[in-house]
Each structure stands twice: as C-alpha cells, then as structure tokens.
Image: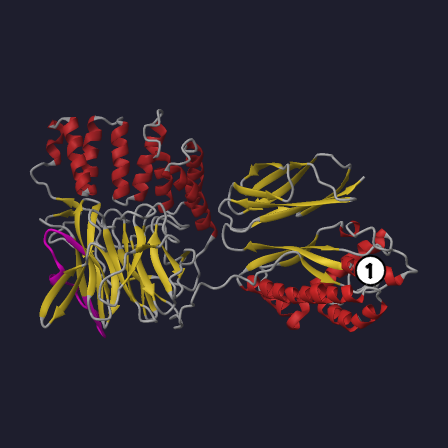
Amino acid sequence: MPRLYLTFGVLALGFSCFAQVKLKDLIAFGDEQFRKGDYYYASKVYDQALTLDSNSLDLHWKQAETQRAYKNYSEAANWYAKVYAEDVEKKYSNSILYYALMVKQTGDYTKALSLFKKAYKELSDFPDEVAYKKAKQEIKSTEFAIKTKAPIDKIIQAMPDSINSYDAEFGHAFRDGTFYFSSLKADSINAQEEVYTKFYRTRNYTSTYDSLGFSKPKQWESLSDPARSTGNGSFDENGWFYYSICNDKGYNYQCKIVRYKVINGKPTLDTLSELINAIGYNTTNPCWVTMKNGKEYLFFSSNREGGNGGMDLWYSMLKNNGTFETPKNITALNSVENEITPWFDVDSNRLYFSSTWHYGYGGYDVFYSDVSEKLQFSKAKNVGLPINNAANDLYYFRQGDSIFVSSNRLGSLSKKNPTCCSDIYFATVEQPLKHNPPDTLPPPPPAITFPVKLYFRNDYPNPKSYAKKSSAPYDVLYQDYLAARQNYLDSSLDQSQLTSFFTNEVDPGYHVLLKLYDSVIHEINRGNSILLFSRGYASPLNVTQYNVNLTQRRISSVQRFFLEYQNGALKKKLDKNKSVQFEIVEVPLGEYAANQSTSDDINNRTASVYSTAASIERKVEILYMARSQNTALQRVEASPLVQEEEIKAGSSVSKRISLTHEVSELEINEVKFSQEGLTYQLISLGENTSEMVFQFTPEFSGKHASCYADIQFEGIEEPIRVYFTFVKK
C-alpha cells in the first residue's frame, strides 16, 4: 500500500556530529531508518556516509533503493545508472532493470525502452527469474506507452486544497455529500519536510460538500488506532463501512479488513473472519458490491497463498446465512506482480483496479475488466491517459459523472520531491448507461468451419469471357444456380447423386457464407482488419488460361458479395473507418487441382457439364479468415502472403517472408505447418522489421503442391498465415 515517508526528527543525533561516527555505524543507522520507512532521513544519513567513502558501490546501491522507495524517480535513476556503470562484477545485476523502471516513471519512454532492451539481453541467462520476465514485459509496455496518446477532450484536475495537502491523500468514496479518503497527516511539519510527531500513520478522513465547496477534513476518530494505520473504505447496502487496519513497519504493511457501523447509537467494530483475513498475510483494499441480481460480494487484494505472486485480486460472495464463501482468485487479471485497489462499477459491469504489470505508462496504472453475471473477467484494458500517467495511479472510483483517482504525478503538492506524495484528482466523464450484465462475456464470432465451399454454374459468371473480374455478386449467382437446378437435374444421368450435391453442398455453402459475412462484420465493428484467403477451381472443360481467368472471376464475385450485401453495409463501415481493411487474397493453382478424370468432352455435356463430378469442380474455397488487431502493439504485416513457384518434385525450397511490426522485436511462440519437415528461422533486420526463412520439401499431389504456415508470435494474439504453392516441372 502506497504511503508517504518523511523524516522523523531525531534531535539527539545531529548531522554535525556524523563525522565522528564510524562509517559502519553510520550505515547501520541509515539502514535502520530505511527499515522504518523513513526514506528521506535514510537518504540524508547515506549522504553523510558517502562523504567518508564516496566510491562505495554498496552505498550507491542503498541510495538508489532509498530514492526509489521515496518515489524520487529522477534521483533514483541517477543512482541506479551509477551502480550499473560501476558494477563490473554484476553484484547488483538488476540495477539496469531498476534504472529503466525509474527512467520510465520520469516519462522518458524512448530512453526507458532502450534500457529495457539492454536489461532483457543482459538478464537472458536467467529466463525463469522475475527480473527477466519483467524486462520482457516492460519492452512491450513501454512501446504501448509510446504509441498511445491522450485524448484532447479529457481533462483531469486536482481536488481543492481543502482535500489535498503536502501529505499524501487517497480517495475512497463520495456518498451522500461526504467525501471519504485516507491521508498521512502529521501533528507538526516544518518547511524541510521534517515531522515532529510521535505517531505518523495513515488515517481515515471525511469532508462534506455543499455550495461553498468541501469543508475542512475531519479525522474519523471512531476508526483510529494510535498504534496502527487505517485506510481504504467501502460501504455495503446496510451502512457497514469496510476498511483496512494495518500494522506497518516501514513499507511492510500487514493489514486486515474490519467493518464499522453505529448500531443503536453505539459505534460497533467487527473484524472479518480468518476466511477473509488469512493469518500471516496482508489483506486490504475492500470493495463491497451488490450486483444487479442481488448477490453481494467483497472484492479485496491480498498476498495469501494460492495467488499468482505479490498482491492479487480476490472476491468472496456473502451467503444467505451471513458468512462468506471461500475467496476466489481472479486469475484472469492477476500477475506475478501487484494488482490492488479494486472498485466495481455496477452500472457498466466493470471491475477497475491498479497494477504494475499490465501494459501501462508508469508504475501503477488503472485498468478495467468487463465482468459477466457469472463473474467471468475479460482481459485487462488500460483506461488510458490522462487518468494514468508516468507515476502511480490508484484508487479509481466513479460517482455519477465524475471519476476520481489518487496519483503522485507531477503537479501534486510537495515541498521537495515532486513525486513524493499522492493527491486526489478528478475528471468529468459520460455516465455509463445502466444495463444488466450478460450471462457470459460477449460471444465470439459465429463458428465457421473452413474451407467454405461456394459452387457455380458451368462457365459462370460471364460465360465465354476471358475477363478476370465480374460485376455479379455471389448471392445473385447462387440464386441463378437455384433457378437452373431443375435443368441440371433433368440433364443428368445421376439425378439422385446430383440432388444430394445441391442439398448437402451447394445450399449449405451459401448459408455458411452468410455466417461468415456476419463474422466479418463483427470483426470490423471491433476495429479488426480481415483477410480471407481463397482459391478458385474450374472443371477441366476448357484450356488452362481460360480456367485461370474463370477462377479469378469467381473470386471477384465473392468479393462483390461482401461489399454489396445488405445494401453495402460492409463497404460503408470500411469507408467510415479507414484504419480497418477487408481483402480477399487469392491462393493460386486451383485450376491445376481439378480431378483430371472428370470428362472434358465438349460434345458430351451430360458428363462434362451436368454430372456431379463436373459440378463439384466448379467452386471457390474460402480457406481461412485472418484477423489483424489494430490496437497498439498487435499489428504485424507479412509480405508476401502467398508465394508460387514451378519446381521439380522432391526439391527442397527456401522461402522468405518480410515482417513489419509495432513491437520493436518479434519473438516466435509457435509455428504450425500443414506438412512435415519444416525448419524456420526468425531474423531481426532492425527495429520493427524482421524476416522469416522457411526450409522444406513440398509434397506434391498430382501436378501441384500447396501448404501453409501459421506463425504465432509472443504477445501477439492473432497468428499470421502465409501460403506456398508449387507447380511440378
């Protein structure tokens, strides 16, 4: 839990007598102040120690750690840089990582990205260590920060000085005209940030709001414990106030959740059971939620057993008998680091929280997850700028059309270190529409089994033409084929088999195409670009070049269907949003794949036109639908997507694919190949450009061979598909 640490006045030991103290005693005294959490004082003690031994690597490290804990990011970065430059033996191997983290929190993302890449390479000998994983994550996180910009229409402001102060404030709730928050406030503090008080702890405060603004904050005495800190806060429907009470030694909090209510005029405190407050662990940040279905839940954060690491998000449902169910870990959101300060927006069915792990702009960022009625949690999404910034952002909540967040960003009230202390900020937003949560998360697009097979009349569209494109969309051609169905049946020698072909192949193919259209619209609405890989076929009734052009006309009719169906709905969406694209890519050689035993006797139309064998060959197959997310760091473009070549059977081939990507460097997670015997290599050509080299021997079927590779990159949700086609010499 974040808090401000200032110096306690230790008058018995003045800095003027430090020169008389042995160095080791001086360091021990500084270490003691660090353990107490008095980082400002610790840094001053280490400064004095450095006058006695200015070249001490250990002292430089202590100063770096102290400034990081004090949230003095620029000073911490300077000290970590010094350690990294001096540490030849790599005693402090993580100094480069912390250096990068501190630079990131100053907002210098370009420099931070370079440092994270260096840290990633230097820590690669220990891939299972958290530091290596953190460096890897921060490369993508910092690239995310570089590529996203703040909306110009959203302004965030500090709460008035009647709430914010030179101490640290953290907002919790705004209810019935009263603002609830916690703060570190000392009895006496001088201009040098030296505190003269026996106890300097977090306390809960209230401030009422009326036409004159916010009143002077009052400490909530009923919650206070002189020996412990209190903070956080959330009301349930019955007026109980849930908050945290903590034993703290410096930065090491161990909290439990307590609730408070005045009953019959008597203040009542009730500590939640050990089912919630697991013994020996930190349990804090309570958030009480009454769902629209009437069920009540307590969300909180804890480092208890069963988590992913650090502080995790948990929830527990209140049973009818007033006891809690066993808490459940929100594994979909938790990471190896910290997820804290949950707040649930019942109107929008979203859980907001802060984390140091997911892609963000600084230390703690605010994220949200869409939640279903069955408590399924979608992937965490950053709420963006300016709610988040390069420092720490916590305790997000909304009241009406105002959101609140607590942050130690530049501009917060301070006397020395500009990022030492959190203030409470607010912004005006559109109030979310109230709607019931779905039973489950939004469903994926309709399930499509590929290939999707679309069949055509003989020589259609545009009979007896060498044109490569057609103006007829496939739905019109399908209706035309239906109208000609009886003529085909009357002219066929195998009417039963041909009837089965129309019923089981032609009609279902068209209906699957309609589902595919809905799926494409779904993805375009989500902001994703779509590629459809297709292959055209023709019966062997005509010469090869004619059939090549015929297959291209058939593919163009499918393209026209997508763009013109439902009064051109898809085309209108593409015209409106130029950032998304729709394209049909031809995978050639379908003209070679026709069954060569099918009759090509122009004089025997019963066999070459009206037979089931000939009808099966006249088709377009949509082989695959590739999605490309247009969100930050998800875009990867491959070129060429399709390659064709004429080779001898049994020859080994080498194929190259050029890749451009938003992430600075790609890393392969998996490659799936449609045949055996593939070897591949990913080569970095520079920042944001790479090349893949494939080596394999094509497996021929008759005169042609065709294969594909699905490339899954680390951190990129959608795979990249590329095709290779070959004609036998």
Residue 689 or residue 266, whichever sits in front: 266
Q: Is residue 723 magenta?
A: no
Q: Residue 553's spot in the image, x, y percent? A: 77, 60
The span picked out in magenta is 207-230
Residue underneath mark 1:
467
- Say whether residue 192 is visible: no
Q: Quadrant of the C terminus?
A: top right
Q: In the image, is 388 to the left or to the right of 255?
A: right
209 within the magenta span: yes
- Left-right relation of 597 to 224: right
Residue 725, image x and y in percent?
72, 45
| Residue 195 sits above or below residue 605 on the image | above
- Check the image and name the residue furthest to the top: 89
**Between 719 and 636, which is closer to the camera in this rendering?**
719
- Expressed as whole percent of the image width and height from the top left, the position of residue 102 reads 34, 42
Judge by depth and name the residue closer to the eye, 27 or 356: 356
Residue sitting at the far right: 603
